[in-house]
Amino acid sequence: MEAVMGVDFDPGYVRARYRKLVSDHPDDSVYPLSDFRVEWGPIFHRGRLDGTARVLVIGQDPATHEAICRRILVGEAGQRVQGLLARLGITRSYVLANAFLYSVYGQGGGERHVDDPGIVAYRNRWLDAIARDNQLDAVISLGHLADRAHETWRATPSGSRCPAAYATVLHPTYPESASRRGQITKAEAFARLCTSWNEALVALHPLITQDVPTPLSRYGTSIARTDLAAIPACDLPAGMPPWMRSLDAWARRMGTDADSKRATITVSIPKKARTWPAVD
Ligand code: URA
Protein backbone atom coordinates (compact mmCIF):
# COMPACT_ATOMS: atom_id res chain seq x y z
CA MET A 1 0.00 0.00 0.00
CA GLU A 2 1.23 3.56 -0.73
CA ALA A 3 2.21 5.57 2.34
CA VAL A 4 -0.43 8.19 3.11
CA MET A 5 2.11 10.92 3.84
CA GLY A 6 3.33 12.74 0.75
CA VAL A 7 0.63 11.47 -1.61
CA ASP A 8 0.03 14.02 -4.34
CA PHE A 9 -3.50 15.05 -5.36
CA ASP A 10 -5.32 17.43 -7.66
CA PRO A 11 -6.24 20.58 -5.69
CA GLY A 12 -9.25 21.14 -7.95
CA TYR A 13 -10.68 24.33 -9.39
CA VAL A 14 -8.70 26.85 -7.36
CA ARG A 15 -8.03 29.53 -9.98
CA ALA A 16 -10.87 32.05 -10.19
CA ARG A 17 -11.59 31.41 -13.89
CA TYR A 18 -12.03 27.66 -13.35
CA ARG A 19 -14.08 28.18 -10.18
CA LYS A 20 -16.40 30.36 -12.21
CA LEU A 21 -16.52 27.88 -15.12
CA VAL A 22 -17.37 25.00 -12.83
CA SER A 23 -20.08 26.90 -11.01
CA ASP A 24 -21.58 28.07 -14.33
CA HIS A 25 -21.84 24.58 -15.83
CA PRO A 26 -24.77 23.82 -18.15
CA ASP A 27 -27.54 21.49 -16.97
CA ASP A 28 -30.25 19.44 -18.67
CA SER A 29 -31.67 22.53 -20.36
CA VAL A 30 -28.54 22.40 -22.56
CA TYR A 31 -27.70 18.68 -22.41
CA PRO A 32 -31.00 16.81 -23.02
CA LEU A 33 -31.65 13.94 -20.62
CA SER A 34 -32.68 11.74 -23.54
CA ASP A 35 -29.12 11.82 -24.90
CA PHE A 36 -26.88 12.48 -21.88
CA ARG A 37 -26.49 10.96 -18.43
CA VAL A 38 -26.91 14.37 -16.78
CA GLU A 39 -27.96 12.64 -13.54
CA TRP A 40 -24.33 11.61 -12.89
CA GLY A 41 -23.19 15.24 -12.89
CA PRO A 42 -20.74 17.15 -15.09
CA ILE A 43 -17.12 15.95 -15.27
CA PHE A 44 -14.83 18.73 -16.34
CA HIS A 45 -11.21 17.82 -16.93
CA ARG A 46 -8.08 15.98 -15.84
CA GLY A 47 -4.56 17.33 -15.45
CA ARG A 48 -2.93 20.65 -14.77
CA LEU A 49 -4.93 23.85 -14.34
CA ASP A 50 -1.96 25.79 -12.96
CA GLY A 51 -0.55 27.06 -16.26
CA THR A 52 2.06 24.30 -16.71
CA ALA A 53 0.39 22.22 -19.44
CA ARG A 54 2.28 21.82 -22.75
CA VAL A 55 -0.21 19.42 -24.34
CA LEU A 56 -4.00 19.67 -24.47
CA VAL A 57 -5.94 16.47 -25.23
CA ILE A 58 -9.57 16.77 -26.30
CA GLY A 59 -11.56 13.61 -25.60
CA GLN A 60 -15.20 12.74 -26.26
CA ASP A 61 -17.36 12.12 -23.19
CA PRO A 62 -16.88 10.63 -19.71
CA ALA A 63 -17.65 6.97 -19.00
CA THR A 64 -18.11 4.84 -15.89
CA HIS A 65 -14.81 5.23 -14.02
CA GLU A 66 -14.89 8.96 -14.67
CA ALA A 67 -18.31 9.28 -13.01
CA ILE A 68 -16.81 7.97 -9.76
CA CYS A 69 -13.41 9.74 -9.88
CA ARG A 70 -14.83 13.08 -11.08
CA ARG A 71 -11.96 13.39 -13.57
CA ILE A 72 -12.04 12.48 -17.27
CA LEU A 73 -10.16 9.74 -19.14
CA VAL A 74 -9.20 7.63 -16.12
CA GLY A 75 -10.47 4.21 -17.30
CA GLU A 76 -8.88 2.03 -19.98
CA ALA A 77 -9.25 4.74 -22.67
CA GLY A 78 -7.51 7.22 -20.39
CA GLN A 79 -4.69 4.82 -19.64
CA ARG A 80 -4.11 4.29 -23.36
CA VAL A 81 -3.91 8.08 -23.75
CA GLN A 82 -1.61 8.33 -20.75
CA GLY A 83 0.69 5.88 -22.57
CA LEU A 84 0.58 8.06 -25.70
CA LEU A 85 1.54 11.13 -23.65
CA ALA A 86 4.39 9.16 -22.06
CA ARG A 87 5.76 8.40 -25.55
CA LEU A 88 5.81 12.16 -26.13
CA GLY A 89 7.83 12.57 -22.92
CA ILE A 90 4.85 14.14 -21.16
CA THR A 91 4.19 12.74 -17.69
CA ARG A 92 2.73 15.80 -15.95
CA SER A 93 2.46 18.82 -18.26
CA TYR A 94 -0.90 18.08 -19.84
CA VAL A 95 -4.55 18.94 -19.50
CA LEU A 96 -7.47 16.92 -20.86
CA ALA A 97 -10.98 18.19 -21.64
CA ASN A 98 -13.87 16.37 -23.33
CA ALA A 99 -16.17 17.54 -26.13
CA PHE A 100 -19.09 16.75 -23.78
CA LEU A 101 -19.43 17.42 -20.08
CA TYR A 102 -21.80 14.49 -19.55
CA SER A 103 -21.69 10.89 -20.72
CA VAL A 104 -23.54 10.33 -24.00
CA TYR A 105 -26.53 7.99 -23.56
CA GLY A 106 -27.62 5.73 -26.43
CA GLN A 107 -26.83 5.89 -30.13
CA GLY A 108 -26.12 9.06 -32.06
CA GLY A 109 -26.42 11.59 -29.22
CA GLY A 110 -22.88 12.79 -29.75
CA GLU A 111 -23.39 13.40 -33.47
CA ARG A 112 -26.72 15.14 -32.85
CA HIS A 113 -25.41 17.57 -30.25
CA VAL A 114 -21.75 18.29 -30.98
CA ASP A 115 -22.66 21.61 -32.62
CA ASP A 116 -25.45 22.66 -30.22
CA PRO A 117 -24.85 26.35 -29.44
CA GLY A 118 -25.05 25.98 -25.63
CA ILE A 119 -22.68 22.99 -25.63
CA VAL A 120 -20.23 24.73 -27.99
CA ALA A 121 -20.27 28.02 -26.07
CA TYR A 122 -19.44 26.39 -22.73
CA ARG A 123 -16.82 24.04 -24.24
CA ASN A 124 -15.13 27.01 -25.95
CA ARG A 125 -14.94 28.87 -22.63
CA TRP A 126 -12.89 25.95 -21.27
CA LEU A 127 -10.67 25.76 -24.35
CA ASP A 128 -10.12 29.53 -24.26
CA ALA A 129 -9.15 29.42 -20.59
CA ILE A 130 -6.73 26.53 -21.14
CA ALA A 131 -5.14 28.15 -24.21
CA ARG A 132 -4.79 31.49 -22.40
CA ASP A 133 -3.24 29.98 -19.25
CA ASN A 134 -0.72 27.61 -20.81
CA GLN A 135 2.10 27.62 -23.34
CA LEU A 136 0.69 24.77 -25.39
CA ASP A 137 3.00 23.01 -27.83
CA ALA A 138 0.33 20.66 -29.13
CA VAL A 139 -3.36 19.84 -29.13
CA ILE A 140 -4.46 16.23 -29.76
CA SER A 141 -8.08 15.28 -30.40
CA LEU A 142 -9.40 11.75 -29.86
CA GLY A 143 -11.92 10.74 -32.50
CA HIS A 144 -14.07 12.71 -34.90
CA LEU A 145 -16.35 14.40 -32.36
CA ALA A 146 -13.33 15.77 -30.50
CA ASP A 147 -11.87 16.82 -33.86
CA ARG A 148 -15.12 18.65 -34.60
CA ALA A 149 -14.96 20.35 -31.18
CA HIS A 150 -11.42 21.48 -31.95
CA GLU A 151 -12.31 22.73 -35.43
CA THR A 152 -15.27 24.73 -34.07
CA TRP A 153 -13.06 26.31 -31.42
CA ARG A 154 -10.20 27.15 -33.83
CA ALA A 155 -12.75 28.94 -36.03
CA THR A 156 -13.35 31.46 -33.21
CA PRO A 157 -11.13 34.55 -32.85
CA SER A 158 -9.53 33.28 -29.61
CA GLY A 159 -9.14 29.71 -30.90
CA SER A 160 -7.49 30.96 -34.08
CA ARG A 161 -4.81 32.72 -31.99
CA CYS A 162 -3.65 29.45 -30.38
CA PRO A 163 -0.23 28.69 -31.91
CA ALA A 164 -0.11 25.01 -30.84
CA ALA A 165 0.43 22.24 -33.41
CA TYR A 166 -2.53 19.94 -33.93
CA ALA A 167 -3.06 16.24 -34.53
CA THR A 168 -6.28 14.27 -34.57
CA VAL A 169 -6.10 10.52 -33.89
CA LEU A 170 -8.53 7.62 -33.75
CA HIS A 171 -10.33 7.44 -30.42
CA PRO A 172 -8.67 5.06 -27.91
CA THR A 173 -11.76 2.82 -27.84
CA TYR A 174 -12.03 2.69 -31.66
CA PRO A 175 -10.89 -0.99 -31.76
CA GLU A 176 -13.72 -2.07 -29.45
CA SER A 177 -16.44 0.11 -31.00
CA ALA A 178 -15.56 -0.54 -34.66
CA SER A 179 -15.21 -4.31 -34.19
CA ARG A 180 -18.50 -4.41 -32.23
CA ARG A 181 -20.23 -2.78 -35.22
CA GLY A 182 -18.85 -5.61 -37.37
CA GLN A 183 -16.97 -3.26 -39.74
CA ILE A 184 -13.54 -4.68 -39.04
CA THR A 185 -11.85 -7.28 -36.83
CA LYS A 186 -10.51 -6.10 -33.50
CA ALA A 187 -6.93 -6.92 -34.55
CA GLU A 188 -7.29 -4.85 -37.74
CA ALA A 189 -8.86 -2.00 -35.77
CA PHE A 190 -5.96 -2.02 -33.28
CA ALA A 191 -3.50 -1.90 -36.19
CA ARG A 192 -5.36 1.14 -37.58
CA LEU A 193 -5.31 2.81 -34.19
CA CYS A 194 -1.58 2.27 -33.91
CA THR A 195 -0.97 3.70 -37.40
CA SER A 196 -3.00 6.77 -36.49
CA TRP A 197 -1.22 7.24 -33.13
CA ASN A 198 2.20 6.68 -34.74
CA GLU A 199 1.50 9.41 -37.29
CA ALA A 200 0.71 11.83 -34.46
CA LEU A 201 3.83 10.74 -32.54
CA VAL A 202 6.09 11.36 -35.52
CA ALA A 203 4.54 14.79 -36.21
CA LEU A 204 4.42 16.05 -32.62
CA HIS A 205 7.44 14.46 -30.93
CA PRO A 206 9.96 17.08 -32.21
CA LEU A 207 7.70 19.97 -31.17
CA ILE A 208 7.14 19.15 -27.51
CA THR A 209 8.96 20.41 -24.44
CA GLN A 210 9.25 17.09 -22.64
CA ASP A 211 8.95 16.42 -18.91
CA VAL A 212 11.17 13.36 -19.25
CA PRO A 213 13.63 13.02 -22.16
CA THR A 214 12.05 10.29 -24.26
CA PRO A 215 13.29 9.20 -27.68
CA LEU A 216 10.66 8.58 -30.33
CA SER A 217 9.31 5.05 -30.19
CA ARG A 218 6.38 3.86 -32.27
CA TYR A 219 3.59 1.45 -31.36
CA GLY A 220 3.59 -2.00 -32.91
CA THR A 221 0.34 -3.32 -34.34
CA SER A 222 -1.64 -3.45 -31.12
CA ILE A 223 -1.84 -1.75 -27.73
CA ALA A 224 -0.50 -4.14 -25.13
CA ARG A 225 -1.00 -3.79 -21.39
CA THR A 226 2.59 -2.55 -21.21
CA ASP A 227 1.62 0.34 -23.52
CA LEU A 228 -0.84 1.64 -20.91
CA ALA A 229 0.22 4.06 -18.21
CA ALA A 230 -1.46 4.41 -14.82
CA ILE A 231 -3.12 7.70 -13.93
CA PRO A 232 -0.82 9.77 -11.68
CA ALA A 233 -1.96 10.57 -8.13
CA CYS A 234 -1.70 14.31 -8.88
CA ASP A 235 -4.65 13.95 -11.31
CA LEU A 236 -7.31 12.77 -8.86
CA PRO A 237 -9.06 14.60 -6.02
CA ALA A 238 -7.59 14.18 -2.52
CA GLY A 239 -8.19 10.88 -0.80
CA MET A 240 -8.85 8.68 -3.83
CA PRO A 241 -7.50 5.17 -3.15
CA PRO A 242 -4.56 4.12 -5.39
CA TRP A 243 -6.52 1.25 -7.00
CA MET A 244 -8.79 3.85 -8.66
CA ARG A 245 -5.75 4.84 -10.75
CA SER A 246 -4.60 1.31 -11.49
CA LEU A 247 -4.75 -0.60 -14.77
CA ASP A 248 -7.47 -2.94 -13.47
CA ALA A 249 -11.11 -2.08 -14.23
CA TRP A 250 -13.16 -1.48 -11.08
CA ALA A 251 -16.45 0.15 -12.15
CA ARG A 252 -19.30 -1.29 -14.24
CA ARG A 253 -22.83 -0.26 -15.12
CA MET A 254 -25.14 -2.96 -13.76
CA GLY A 255 -28.88 -3.53 -13.93
CA THR A 256 -31.54 -5.92 -15.12
CA ASP A 257 -33.19 -3.33 -17.39
CA ALA A 258 -32.21 -0.07 -19.11
CA ASP A 259 -33.57 2.04 -16.26
CA SER A 260 -31.74 0.29 -13.43
CA LYS A 261 -28.56 0.06 -15.55
CA ARG A 262 -28.64 3.80 -16.13
CA ALA A 263 -29.07 4.32 -12.39
CA THR A 264 -26.35 1.96 -11.16
CA ILE A 265 -22.57 1.81 -11.24
CA THR A 266 -21.04 -1.02 -9.23
CA VAL A 267 -17.59 -0.35 -7.80
CA SER A 268 -15.52 -3.37 -6.93
CA ILE A 269 -11.95 -3.23 -5.57
CA PRO A 270 -9.63 -5.17 -7.93
CA LYS A 271 -8.39 -8.48 -6.49
CA LYS A 272 -4.77 -7.29 -6.42
CA ALA A 273 -5.72 -4.35 -4.19
CA ARG A 274 -7.54 -6.50 -1.59
CA THR A 275 -4.70 -6.34 0.90
CA TRP A 276 -6.80 -6.82 4.02
CA PRO A 277 -6.47 -10.00 6.12
CA ALA A 278 -8.40 -12.89 4.65
CA VAL A 279 -11.96 -13.27 5.93
CA ASP A 280 -13.90 -16.52 5.80
N1 URA B 1 -13.52 8.82 -21.02
C1 URA B 1 -13.48 10.16 -21.24
O1 URA B 1 -13.53 10.94 -20.30
N2 URA B 1 -13.38 10.60 -22.52
C2 URA B 1 -13.32 9.79 -23.57
O2 URA B 1 -13.21 10.24 -24.71
C3 URA B 1 -13.36 8.39 -23.32
C4 URA B 1 -13.46 7.93 -22.03
Image (tube, rainbow, N blue to C red):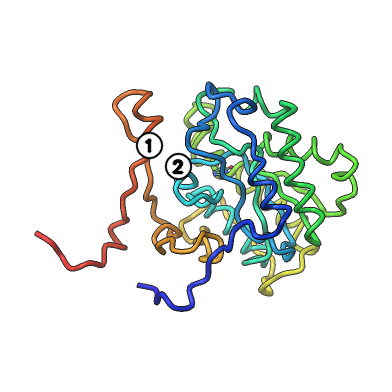
Q: Residues within 10 Å of mark 1 (few under 14, many from 20)?
A: some
- Does any portion of residue 105 appear in the rendered image? yes
What is the secondary structure assignment of the residue under circle 2?
helix
Horizontal side of 213 relative to 129 (left or right) equals: left
Q: Amino acid at mark 1?
A: Arg
Residue 91 coordinates in the image, percent (x, y): 62, 67
The answer to whether the beta carbon of the residue marked 2 is less than 8 Å from any atom of ligand 1 is no
The residue nearer to you, when weighing 234 against 201, is 234
Residue 60 coordinates in the image, percent (x, y): 62, 39
Quarter of the render that holds ligand 1: top right
Image marks 2 and 1: residues in contact by CB distance under 8 Å: yes
Residue 259 coordinates in the image, percent (x, y): 37, 24
- Does any portion of residue 218 appear in the rendered image? no
Q: Quadrant of residue 257?
A: top left
Horizontal side of 23 relative to 208 (left or right) equals: left
Q: Which residue is mark 1?
A: 253
Rendered position, 232 above or below 64: below
Tag shown at residue 64: 2
Residue drawn at the location 56% of the way across and 48% of the way down: 72
